[in-house]
């Protein structure tokens, strides 16, 4: 995806900061299996990928933080082991000698309700929401979206967010199994129960964050478990209202990169407004002895992903002024 020449240029001078990243560990203490498409999944090996990632990040000694892009345990994890398994994986992340930022994915929510999950992931958001932002240096801001804000999983069955999600699924997906895309065409295939949407209040919050970042002349990296652009992902993996979120992002010039997980094979594109979209390869689908994790070097005029193993490297350039 990226070029070794571009990475060599980026490595020619010091980054503002760097951080580690990994996605879709989906650990479970169960035998290997396959996805609904027949792709092998290595449930027990994935935690070894994470352990090697943490060691590599610590050995680097300069990463400011690590971001986990969701789905740290698998939906097939025995339910009586859900809490202890989530805690086990979080403990592996906590061996990193720095801050760790988590986000929720659908497999996390299959295992635990938000009320139990968010405290384990150290996500401190009001009313069970899992979106937040942080600024590691004055020049940059990171936005972590809650892609399951409107969702049929994770909230109580009678919660307004659940009811809103079920209404969307009834209108958009005629199948009895709402995780089946049979008969759905093109981008309509995203209306599946294992996806979700960003709600109205979160959209208003995001607008406020982007407005403030513009005023502060900050460049923004948007992170979400669910991909935000069909150019970087299959239709089945997209955020339900990805188009609304992207329309909002495009009203500003501050967002330079959108990072996501969920679509395990990974992906990359540049959208119509020059925003980069990078979907990360899954740790879960690494055969024994292989890896999928990486780190990012952040500069004033580019963001360079340095991948390990199955995670491809990428060098992403933009105007150093940011065109605010």
Image (cartoon, grey):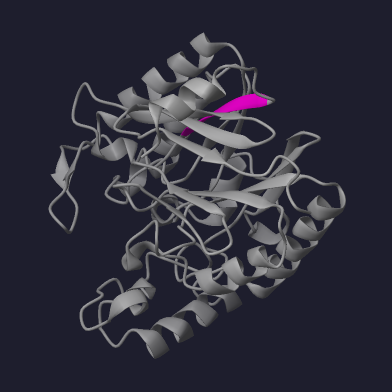
Q: In which quarter of the image is residue 209?
A: bottom right
Residue sitting farthest toward the left: 38
Q: State the residue at coordinates (60%, 68%).
A: 245
Circle count:
0
How far from the left and from the top, in percent, is residue 31? 15, 37
In the picture, the quarter occupied by the C terminus is bottom right
| Left or right: 184 as drawn, with respect to 162 | left
The N terminus lies in quadrant:
top left
Residue 69 visible, this angle: yes
Q: Position of residue 53 (x, y in %)?
A: 42, 22
Residue displayed at 49% across by 69% down: 151
Against 105, residue 297 (above or below) is above
Instruction: Please tell me whether residue 128 is drawn above or below residue 84 in the rendered image.
Output: below
Closest to the observer, 310 or 273: 273
Residue 244 as seen in the image, left or right of residue 179: right
What range is drawn magenta here?
17-21
- Report x, y in % for residue 296: 53, 30
Q: Is residue 166 left or right of residue 49?
A: right
Whether the magenta-drawn stretch holds residue 319 is answered as no
- Confirm whether residue 92 shows in the render: no
Name the spot of residue 20 as percent of width and height, x first.
52, 28
Q: In this view, does 147 lie above or below 172?
A: above
Q: Which residue occupies 77% across, 45% down?
A: 218
């Amino acid at each position: 995806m990226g070029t070794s020449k571009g990475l060599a240029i980026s490595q020619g001078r010091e980054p503002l900061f760097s951080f580690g990243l990994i996605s879709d560990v989906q650990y479970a203490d169960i035998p290997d299996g396959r996805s609904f498409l027949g792709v092998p999944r290595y449930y027990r090996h994935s935690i070894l990928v994470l352990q090697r990632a943490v060691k590599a990040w610590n050995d680097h000694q300069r990463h400011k933080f690590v971001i986990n892009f969701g789905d740290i345990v698998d939906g097939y994890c025995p339910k009586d082991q859900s809490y202890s398994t989530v805690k086990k994986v979080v403990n592996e992340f906590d061996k990193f000698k720095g801050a760790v930022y988590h986000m929720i994915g659908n497999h996390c929510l299959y295992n635990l309700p938000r009320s139990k999950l968010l405290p384990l992931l150290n996500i401190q958001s009001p009313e069970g929401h899992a979106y937040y932002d942080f600024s590691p240096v004055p020049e940059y801001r990171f936005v972590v979206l809650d892609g399951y804000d409107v969702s049929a999983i994770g909230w109580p069955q009678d919660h307004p967010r659940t009811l809103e999600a079920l209404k969307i699924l009834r209108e958009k997906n005629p199948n009895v199994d709402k995780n089946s895309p049979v008969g759905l065409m093109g981008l309509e295939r995203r209306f599946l129960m294992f996806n979700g949407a960003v709600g109205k209040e979160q959209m208003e919050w995001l607008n406020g964050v982007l407005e403030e970042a513009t005023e502060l002349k900050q460049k923004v990296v948007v992170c979400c478990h669910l991909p935000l652009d069909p150019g970087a992902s299959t239709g089945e993996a997209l955020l339900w209202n990805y188009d609304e979120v992207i329309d909002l992002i495009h009203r500003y010039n501050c967002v330079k990169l959108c990072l996501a997980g969920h679509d395990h094979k990974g992906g990359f594109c540049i959208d119509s407004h020059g925003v980069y979209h990078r979907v990360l390869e899954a740790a879960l689908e690494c055969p024994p002895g292989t890896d999928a994790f990486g780190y990012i070097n952040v500069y004033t005029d580019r963001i360079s992903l340095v991948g390990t193993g199955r995670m491809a490297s990428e060098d992403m350039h933009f105007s150093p002024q940011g065109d605010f």
